Amino acid sequence: MELIARAAGRIERVSVEREGGRYRVRVGERAYEVEAHALGSFVRSLLVDGASYEVAVFRQGASSWSVSHRGRPTVVEMVDPLAHLAEATRGEGARKGRQVVAAYMPGRVIGVSVAEGDTVEAGAPLVVLEAMKMQNEIQAERAAVVRRVHVAPGQAVEGGDPLVELE
Amino acid sequence: MKRFRKVLIANRGEIAVRVLRALRELEIASAVIYSEADRDALPVLMADQAFPIGPAPAAESYLRMEAIVDLAVSIGADAIHPGYGFLSERAEFSALCRERGVVFVGPSPEAIGGMGSKVAARRRMIAAGVPVVPGSDGPLDDFDAARACAERIGFPVMLKASAGGGGKGMRVVRAAAELAEAYRLARAEAGASFGDDAVFLERFVERPRHVEIQVLGDLHGKVVSLGERECSLQRRHQKVVEESPSTVVGPELRRRMGEAAVAAASAVGYSNAGTCEFLLDAEGRFYFLEMNTRIQVEHPVTEMVTGLDLVVAQLRVAQGEPLGPEFEGVEPRGHAIEVRLYAEDPFRKFAPSPGRILWLRLPQGPGVRCDAGVYGGSEISIYYDPMIAKLIVWGRDRVEALRRLGRALEELRVEGIRTNVPLFEALLADADFRAGRFDIHWLDRKLGAGELAPVERAGLPDLPILAAAIAHYERAQSVAAVGGGAAGSRSRWRTAARRGGLRSGSWS
């Protein structure tokens, strides 16, 4: 299986082959022999050329995975090479489309700093969430126009719930 | 003396589990209360009996004094252990228990009240000969009074607005020549900020440490000191690491601080476990801050170096047992360090990280103790303190304790939520921390200046890609096997946002 991996600013060609219980994985020019065992639903023991790693792998979307090693997460996108090529051709402009800003944890909305139609700068406060008696300001990652506001002060939200849509 | 047959624990989380363990060892039946959010929590699973007390918010559950005492009476509990937080330092709760014939495992309402008001407690401590930060004890009449007071207590001094708070109207004065100008400015600032230009003066304690003394009193008037805990490592006034002994406290200073703590506790007729907090300056002068009239979160470090069980001791003295010879002349043996594991994300300004713990393996082995209130599968709720466990290590000396701390943190696995473990890894790599060189402002200063960076681990940079590639491959195979199609996803921006937050390699 041929894939493109995008992780932490890196883009790598990846190929995966299975041979019995083992995987032969190529990442760029590097080849690895990996033995992978699932321990429960999320955690895998990987023996990579003999070195032992315990990782948790969570699926976040059709092609997006969060890999946590000793509590530190890395998000890896695994895409079809053709899809990657198509995206690259559309260019940066196409990738900067609509952004749904979601609650990254469950909590209560304490304040909403923007209204639909507002223009915001990168770093501008959007929503203040409260959880565990702490307030957390959620900021715009880049300059954008507020297209939709999904929440109102006082509202309880779950992790992943949309708060604001930017474009 | 009446032995307890059943005790109700009016708390949750790790301290409820801690009290349960003590009850088991004393062969006392245990009952816990739980809020709607805690039905599946560890104390409920471990206790002999568990009773619902209300909805998730603490005000509607763990803080319902009347309902809790009613429950204790109705289930035939002889006593209530309040743990820490919640009702543990409420004099009215201690009084209500007494009124209803249930023993409160803690000090009397009079002792709690005697330490409750800072102003009254300070006056009482001065009368008992306990050192407090020297000062004018009230507003200064004029500049002459300010000068006389400053000369009496010595420079540097701090001028503070009587009506103030939050740093407004505070001025540090390092020499007599600067006092007149500082006095004029402090009054003007106090007047402008608070509408009251009264100021008072006290000694400015530079780069102090927070060192506290564990005391224990029985119901027969005896109070003992069980040594100090060094708690200077704090992030925004929240203790993060505690240890015993303190690297700057020797036998002589320990004896003097212990005597002061015993005098402080005795002055209010204290019984049960309590802690006197002191500021300790670089010259070894110490000043009473306040007394915590309960068991402390960090009590295990004292247990590790004294070999005593403080919660068992709390229950015993509450039953009326006198303190035995094992509590006399206690000296620390070896070195213990505790770190508080919080469900918070150090890469996101320490934002809380509630959610379900999907995978948990707690460290074990020589010199390691882990007091946890959770298990793999536990939900970390948004309603309460985000502490999930305390990791305590013991070594013959501090170097061995630090080595064990590093090893234990490597053994720990928590998945599903973020934890503050990277902060401890960074501390272990810091020369000042390793040498014990810090004060109460040190950690905030280091974090603020970006001088305590996350430790970059050597390892396999391709590991996340390998794991994701294999997971992706396996999923594609199983989807193909059941003939399912690929579902679309709109989550890429979210993951991109996460990636952006992680790439910076900084704490926030």
Image (tube, coloured by chain):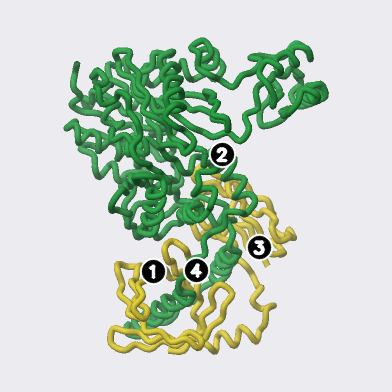
Q: Earlier in the sequence, mark 1 or mark 3?
A: 1
The chain letter corresponding to yellow is A
Residue located at (65% from left, 23% from top): B203
- Check the picture and name the quadrant holding the C terminus of chain B: bottom right
Chain name for mark 2: B
Q: Is residue A82 above or below residue B383?
A: below
Residue behind mark 2:
B439
Numbered mark located on residue A55 in the image: 1
Q: Earlier in the sequence, mark 4 or mark 1?
A: 1
Chain name for mark 4: A
Compared across the picture, whether B383 is left or right of B27 comes to: right
Alpha-carbon span between mark 4 and mark 3: 19 Å
* Image position, residue B271 (x, y; %): 35, 18
Q: Secondary structure at mark 3?
A: loop
Q: Is residue B328 above or below residue B342?
A: above
The chain letter corresponding to green is B
Alpha-carbon span between mark 1 and mark 3: 29 Å
To the question of a shared chain for discs 1 and 3, the answer is yes
Instruction: Bin the neighbour count of mark 3 within 10 Å (Cα to Cα): few under 14, some 14-19, many 20 and up.
Output: some
Alpha-carbon span between mark 2 and mark 3: 36 Å
Q: Secondary structure at mark 2?
A: loop
Residue located at (73% from left, 60% from top): A121
Alpha-carbon span between mark 4 and mark 1: 11 Å
Residue behind mark 4:
A74
Q: Which is nearer the eye, A139 or B341? A: B341
Name the amino acid, label 1. Answer: Val
Instruction: Bin the neighbour count of mark 1 within 10 Å (Cα to Cα): few under 14, some 14-19, many 20 and up.
Output: many
